[in-house]
Amino acid sequence: MARHLTRTLLSGITVAAMLGVAVVSAQAATLHMAWSQDATGLDPHKQTAFSSLRLLELIYEPLVRVDASLQIIPAIATSWAFSKDGKELTFKLDPKAKFQDGTAVTSADVKASFERILDEKTGAAARANFLSIASIDTPDAATVVFHLSQPDVPILTAMSDVNAAIVPASEIKAGSIGTKAVGSGPFKLDKWDPNAKEVLSANKDWAGGATGVDGIEISVLPDEAAILAAMRTKQIDFALLNDPLVATLVPKEASLQLNRVPVLAYHVLQLNPSRKPMTELKVRQAISCAIDRQEVLDTASLGEGKVTGPLTIPALATDPTQLFCYNRDVEKAKKLMAEAGFADGFSATVIGATGEPPTAAAEAQVIQSQLAEIGVKLDIKMMELNVYVDAWLKGDFDMAIALNGGRADPYTMYNRYWTKAGNLQKVANYIDDTLDSQMQQGRAETDPAKRKAIFTEFEKHLAEMSPWIWLYTSYSYTAQQKNIAGFVPTPTGTLFSLSKVTIQQ
């Protein structure tokens, strides 16, 4: 593997040619950045790929954000309050907030944004998070009142996501959302050459204050070893890394710093319970019992992470050893297969995205080998990311290797999959009365201890039903030159703190 990396690493001159820059240090005013996967689109309400979200969160803003401690903090809104009965949520907007075209952000833009998210025709990724919104009032330009059909504890967390970004009402009316990017965030998108480069400039009108750099130039280099080579020659100041094989080499470079934090996102084998024989509970359970999650983690991700159940939020997560069949049991798996009428196994295809995560192919290969022991013949089909996302959203797969985003609240994290009103039901293809009821109870419960108990039962039931096989959580990796200051990594994986990064002389 080390020899392979040596062959893969490009010379500084070759990387410079790929980047289209000279082999010199970056100018102080511009942060030169690289990542391996480009955005798949510019509509913040529709995008699900991590690569898209990481770009869009630098351009667009939601009403609120979560910080590194997963606490709600101001963004476009400076304050918020629930009514005593929990059925009204009132926001006061920052009077300094402006879109990047110079127009003020008003309550009309907030109302139009959430009406767009709630419109089924939009296909918004986070629509299910906001179904409790019965109506929206705008008593003045700086005040927004959400009237809710029921108390909704997680709605604030849901509003912190870039999938709930506030966009200009005028752009919604013009039908231009997704064709150009007009947000109120710290940077403007000046240029986007898909799969090649993004050029961002500082938004001088950003209500959050002055950015630490005048702009960010992002190069898309699909080979992360090439990114590391470019950092060695100081052509790149900052990089987002996904491959643990490359990330673990960064600390060996005296001039570089690795930022490594556990994240809420999870690696998972998604089964499609609407396709035979995954329609059979015992078949799904057999697959769960046949998979050695630790081996998948150790082989595909160098052990960089930990085995997880469905809930990855530290305060709410159940010890995985307490969940159904998290200790591998091949004999039990074979017995379940026989009881389901598949003693001789079956054939299926698993899809994965090339490069996101970079461990996808290795995960699929380990799982292929493990499932072969119970007669499951697994064909691996790797796809380009945009092709994979299209198939994933349609639920057009037998099984899928996925890296799905975590959230600071379990309802916000999972209701789109596991409730009857979930807008990603086509992806999950499974729901039952128990899951739906537990989700709704957890949504309305305000007592933290009772809420934890509800979601503990939810997690245990979901693991036992085995519509998906949760594997492990890993780390968010970013690398930077040591003269880069101010970046704060978080469990959500956001790059938003690039807004305050500075380049030291």
Image (cartoon, rainbow, N blue to C red):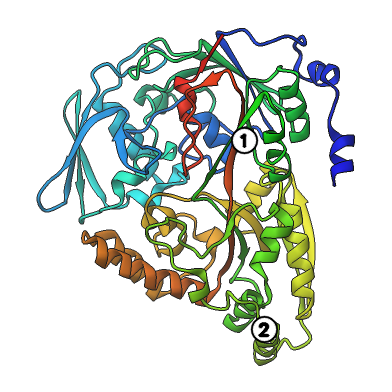
Tell me: residue 422, above or below residue 46. Answer: below
The front one of 397 and 257 is 257
The C terminus, quarter of image: top right
The answer to whether residue 176 shows anywhere in this view is no
Report the number of numbered marks: 2
Residue 403: assigned label? none
Tell me: residue 8, above or below residue 132. Answer: above
Residue 40: assigned label? 1
The answer to whether residue 375 shows anywhere in this view is yes
Residue 333: assigned label? 2
Spot occupied by residue 386 in the image (x, y as percentages of width and height): 67, 42
Regarding mark 2 in the picture, which secondary structure is present there?
helix
The front one of 485 and 309 is 485
Residue at horizontal 30 percent and vertical 48 percent from the top? 155
| 10 Å crowding of disc 2: few (<14), some (14-19), many (20+) | many
Tell me: residue 33, above or below residue 493. Answer: above
Spot occupied by residue 284 in the image (x, y as percentages of width and height): 61, 76
Task: Give the amino acid at mark 2.
Answer: Ala
Spot occupied by residue 133 in the image (x, y as percentages of width and height): 26, 48
Tag nearer the camera, 2 or 1: 2
Task: Give the amino acid at mark 1.
Answer: Thr
